[in-house]
Image (cartoon, rainbow, N blue to C red):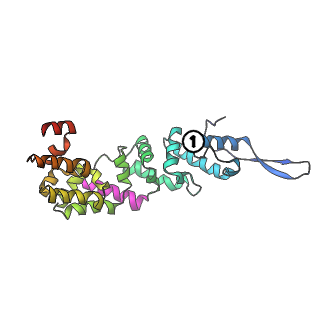
Amino acid sequence: MVLHSLHLPTLSYSYYSSPSHSRYIKFRTTYRENVRYLKTLTIIDPKTNPNNLPLPDAVNHILTTVNFLKSKSFTEPDFPRLHSLCPQLFSHFVDPTDISPAFDFLNDDLLATADQSRALILICPTLLFSDVELCLKPTLRFLQQVGVRNLNVPTNQNAHLLNTRVEKLRAKMRFLQERGFSYEEAANACQRLPAIFGYGVESNLEPKFRYLVKEMKREVDELKKFPQYFGFSLEKRIVPRHLHLKERGVRIPLNRMLMWGDEKFYAKWK
């Protein structure tokens, strides 16, 4: 029988005497039921050998964490994902008091609802282990100063932005400023394309910038008007379309070059 209530059980033991008067501990049914329940959540691997099951205190601890998360709007179908992405969340090293500050931050500083907080954590459970004062709050302040809004909306981008250290965010601003953007222009570009904060400088931003200036012979001012340029694949979108237009002696604004779908673009510039 699967438990339908996750109230923390009081685990107790019964002592049985064998005919030789040796005594051993037998766990009551509640322990077995709780183990079975945690297996349904996949927090305990259903294939775990009975001899390798966690001890009652460990099960007790896991259930405490499960109960705490359920009090924060998490539902049973959420736990397999949580455990898969962040198994340490259910470790005996982690106590609900360790992760409750992150929930307070989401509620009090980010102004996220309980459902929004739940969704953000399901996307990026490691948010729960970020230091609120040293990491989460400074990141939120920086993003708000740049002009990024609606960070409480549970999107993949927002969840990972909130879990990005300020120095990494500043590095993207510096990249733009070192290539001709003023601080205000760099902030505007990042506001219009927050995903830029997640792009690597050497692996993404620099190659695209170099291609724009050296191969496409375009001015930085075009990039200021259309920072979304950085959001397109260099190999799959930017280079093929540039070469296609170059062969035809056509030069059009970046947004028209990249925003149109393939069918419309190649039909227009045959």
Say whether residue 81 is magenta: no
The percent coordinates of residue 59 (x first, y second) are 64, 49
Pointer 1 local density, CA inside 10 Å: few below 14, some 14–19, many at least 20: many
The residue closer to the viewer here, 89 or 6, is: 89
Q: Is residue 252 left or right of residue 74?
A: left
Q: Nearer the viewer, residue 97 or 193?
A: 193
Q: Secondary structure at mark 1?
A: loop
Name the image quarter holding the C terminus. Answer: top left
**Residue 170 visible, this orientation:** no
How far from the left and from the top, in percent, is residue 154? Answer: 37, 43
Which range of residues does the magenta coloring cover?
131-146
Return the residue nearer the eye: 260 or 142: 260
Q: Residue at x 15, y 51 (%)?
A: 225
Residue 137 within the segment the image draws in magenta? yes
- Residue linked to disc 1: 41
Q: Position of residue 267 (x, y in %)?
A: 15, 36
Residue drawn at 45 percent across, 53 percent down: 126
Q: Residue at the location (67% across, 52% down)?
A: 57
Q: In the rendered image of this protein, does residue 238 appear above or below residue 76?
A: below
Three-letter residue code for mark 1: Leu
Q: Is residue 188 visible?
A: yes
Left or right: residue 222 versus residue 81 is left
* Residue shown at 25% from the left, 58% from the top: 205
